[in-house]
């Protein structure tokens, strides 16, 4: 993996050492296991080092992550705008984790864009926008959590890593690699996990907290989506699944219930490109996954106002669910060559 720029590491450690005012840490909107794991892991480590840290999330995060240390103290911007603005007014440093584009900050976009204090980005997505003073952009890392772990060590904070922080960082790596299924070809990732385990992390326990924590409604919704809302296109090695508001209502949908659904069609023999569309009040959220060479981030950027990683990307469109799915169907022939090529590799 690309080594850190030592000057930047030194700059960040000097800046952190001088911090008296609150340090604000922000994940991306609709934060996932890696976003919340990195944010709360880093927050715990910096607090152990005597820093005053506040985490502000642009919106709520899933219940299955609420076991993490100090997760109850996260300020959820959409629920506490005034409080968040006041905290930011007092803060002197802003650390952005697990995103690299202002469009990923939801309703906090203006606040972050107009931030006048020191700003730092720590992230593993490709194509950073470059909106912070310091930037640790490492797309070759499995997850932001893994990056945080190595960065805090590089800054000499190893003594401040506690078991609870290691739990958070382990969770970030586990969720961003699909439980060590993808993005784990670099041996360093398993070495990182091994180091985290030495802090007392129990992988089985963390896995259970995240993945064996579903509601009955969610399991039934999954069954319904698989049987009624999935279309498979074997000739393109692709599949699409969609979730309408009507279905959400029927299964008492809670935010996060469809987490992971986009991956399911990839378990079908011969399928290596999967799309999942969710109907929301104001937009259609798109999620894409692939196996192998097919670059879903390019697909998401070209057609769905999005981006992400080669094998995991997302985006959004302002259209109806039906027309979005239809648009997806119509796009497939354009990509036939790439999709077939991927299969042969
Ligand atoms: P998910 O499908 O889990 O929502 O997102 C997978 C990945 O795609 C995220 O880690 C993020 O990198 C990227 N992503 C998701 N939604 C968007 C979006 O609306 N815009 C951009 N640029 N990237 C997204
Ligand atoms: Mn991530």
Image (spheres, rainbow, N blue to C red):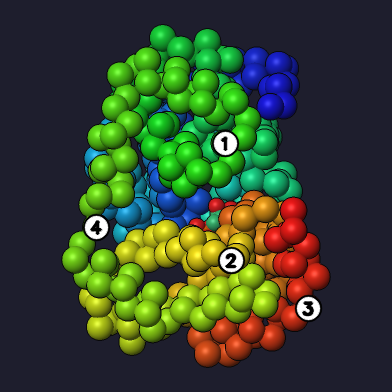
Dot in front, 2 or 4: 2
Real-space Cα distance between discs 1 and 4?
26 Å
**Residue that mark 3 sits on:** 334
Residue visible at 44% across and 20% down? 194
Q: Can residue 106 be seen in this view?
A: no
Real-space Cα distance between discs 2 and 4?
26 Å
**Residue that mark 2 sits on:** 271
Where residue 271 appears, as percent x and y from the top left, is 58, 66
**Residue that mark 4 sits on:** 214
**Residue that mark 1 sits on:** 184
Q: Earlier in the sequence, mark 4 or mark 3?
A: 4
Q: Is residue 205 visible?
A: yes
Dot in front, 3 or 2: 2
Residue visible at 32% across and 78% down? 224
| 232 sits to left or right of 208 | right
Residue contact at pointers 2 and 4, CB within 8 angstroms:
no
| 216 sits to left or right of 244 | left
Q: What element carries label 1?
A: loop
Dot in front, 2 or 1: 2
Residue visible at 64% across and 45% down? 125
Dot in front, 1 or 4: 1
Neighbor class of circle 4 (other Cα within 10 Å; few <14, some 14-19, many 20+) is some
């Amino acid at each position: 993996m690309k080594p850190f720029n030592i000057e930047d590491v030194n700059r960040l450690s000097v800046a952190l050492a001088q911090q008296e005012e609150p340090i604000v840490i922000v994940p991306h909107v609709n934060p996932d296991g890696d976003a919340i794991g990195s944010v709360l892991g880093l927050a715990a480590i910096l607090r152990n080092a005597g820093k005053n840290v506040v985490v502000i999330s642009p919106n709520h995060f899933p219940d299955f992550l609420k076991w993490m240390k100090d997760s109850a103290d996260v300020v959820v911007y959409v629920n506490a705008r005034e409080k968040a603005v006041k905290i930011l007014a007092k803060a002197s440093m802003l650390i952005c984790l697990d995103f690299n584009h202002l469009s990923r900050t939801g309703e906090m976009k203006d606040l972050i864009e107009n931030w006048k204090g020191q700003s730092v980005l720590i992230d593993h997505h490709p194509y950073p926008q470059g909106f912070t003073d310091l930037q640790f952009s490492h797309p070759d890392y499995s997850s932001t959590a893994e990056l945080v772990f190595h960065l805090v060590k590089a800054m000499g904070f190893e003594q401040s890593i506690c078991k609870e922080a290691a739990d958070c960082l382990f969770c970030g790596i586990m969720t961003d690699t699909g439980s060590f299924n993808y993005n784990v070809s670099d041996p360093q990732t398993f070495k990182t996990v091994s180091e985290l385990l030495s802090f007392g992390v129990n992988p089985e326990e963390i896995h259970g907290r995240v993945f064996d924590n579903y509601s009955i409604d969610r399991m039934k919704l999954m069954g319904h989506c698989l049987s009624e809302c999935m279309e498979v296109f074997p000739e393109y090695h692709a599949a699409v699944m969609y979730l309408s508001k009507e279905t959400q209502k029927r299964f008492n949908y809670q935010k996060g219930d469809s987490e992971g659904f986009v991956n399911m069609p990839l378990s079908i023999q011969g399928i290596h490109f999967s799309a999942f569309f969710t109907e929301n009040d104001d937009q259609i959220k798109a999620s894409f996954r692939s196996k192998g060479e097919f670059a879903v981030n390019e697909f998401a950027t070209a057609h769905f106002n999005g981006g992400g990683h080669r094998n995991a990307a997302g985006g959004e469109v302002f259209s109806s669910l039906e027309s979005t799915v239809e648009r997806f169907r119509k796009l497939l022939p354009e990509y036939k060559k790439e999709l077939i090529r991927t299969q042969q590799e």
